[in-house]
Amino acid sequence: MIDMLTAVHQDLPEEYRTLSDQELDRRITEAKRRLGSDLVILGHHYQRDDVIQFADYRGDSLKLAKIAEKLHDVKYIVFSGVHFMAETADTLTTDEQIVVLPDMKAGCSMADMADIDEVEEAWEVIQEEFGDTVIPVTYVNSTAAIKAFVGRHGGTTCTSSNAEAVLKWAFERKKRILFLPDQHLGRNTAYKMGIPLEQMIIWAPTTGEFEDYHCDREDVRMILWKGHCSVHQKFLPEHVHRVRERDPEMKVIVHPECSFEVVQLADDNGSTDYIIRTIEAAPPGSKWAIGTEVNLVQRLAQEHPEQKIMLLSTTMCPCLTMNRIDRPHLLWALENLVEGNVVNQIKVDPETTHWSKVALDRMLAIQ
């Protein structure tokens, strides 16, 4: 899959890099007008403000997946996000529809931590250790190849919004879950469901060994892939302590991709959509320190001046790969579509599409 994506990657022409902000906005608006109903732009909440302003729909991974599935009459879907999100959109849409990622270098470090060859090797070891008692579940922040793997092996995908419902579904089918690629979401969700930390072990792909294996084999419930989000990993317990020392009235809300220690110290935790809804429902004068991607935190602060909203960390925490989707790349992709050219198309092969769609459809059917 990576080789295929690299093969279709095209670099941004230099002429787009020198355009003024006003010219970029004007030409993007004009390109959208000319493409009309043939085009839909999807934007993830972590996207930068100057790009997400052009999104026809914005949301977290679950919302955008559901939207993509329903865009039957749209010719072009331009994804302002990262590559695994665009792969999901291509998987859920028809063969005739075209999904474009304006910059192929907009990847995801977490998704890259679960290589399909490493997962296949790990599965053999896990089967030898635990037999046919394990069902794989992958966070949607994973490649199409990983989604296809869990689809072939009876598993499904999840998002941070529906992780608890998905794990409940999985435990109804097998005694144990292999959760990948984010150990923190898996750990935090399972603990919230009442599974003790002692019944969770880690699979480390770099060494090919289990870690934190402190219980009897029969007691293991969660096998956590040793991966993480490079953004949410930066939020530390000392950040929570510092906020509380400075202002005891400040509430702390974080994303469950943060470490277990940070989630336990926070007042609340939840998906991107949950964080947004919590802030929207909060009364004027409330104070929030938010542990998630900085673009979203800054946007919430701008949209809710009646509240005091700040980033939990003292340092900026942007998703650098998400930020690769900028206005020059978006304009270039759109103007090529106007001319009938397609640049940086995301195209998942038929076999991978079939099995990853099986996994995604299972998730979308879980209530």
Image: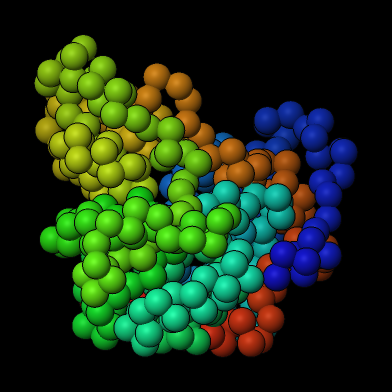
In the rendered image, the quadrant that contains the C terminus is: bottom left
Closer to the camera, 142 or 79?
142
Give residue 76's quadrant in the image.
bottom right
Q: Is residue 93 visible?
A: no
Give residue 7's quadrant in the image.
bottom right
Q: Picture coordinates of residue 205 (x, y %)?
A: 54, 59
Colouring scheme, one of rainbow, by chain, secondary structure, one colour: rainbow
Is 164 situated left or right of 342 in this image?
Answer: left
Q: Picture coordinates of residue 302 (x, y %)?
A: 36, 28
Is 329 situated left or right of 83 in this image?
Answer: right
Give residue 134's quadrant in the image.
bottom left
Q: Picture coordinates of residue 179 (x, y %)?
A: 39, 66
At horizontal 47% and vertical 31% (from top left) the residue drawn is 317
At horizontal 47% and vertical 39% (from top left) the residue drawn is 231
At horizontal 68% and vertical 63% (from top left) the residue drawn is 100
Please tell me whether residue 234 is drawn above or below residue 86 in the rendered image: above
At horizontal 52% and vertical 71% (from top left) the residue drawn is 122
Please tell me whether residue 7 is drawn above or below residue 277 in the rendered image: below
Closer to the camera, 140 or 215?
215
Q: Is residue 244 visible?
A: yes
Closer to the camera, 8 or 165?
165
Q: Picture coordinates of residue 169 (x, y %)?
A: 25, 78
Q: Residue furthest top?
A: 246
In the rendered image, the quadrant that contains the N terminus is: bottom right
Please tell me whether residue 17 is drawn above or below residue 55 in the rendered image: above
Closer to the camera, 362 or 42?
362
Is 58 situated left or right of 9 in this image?
Answer: left
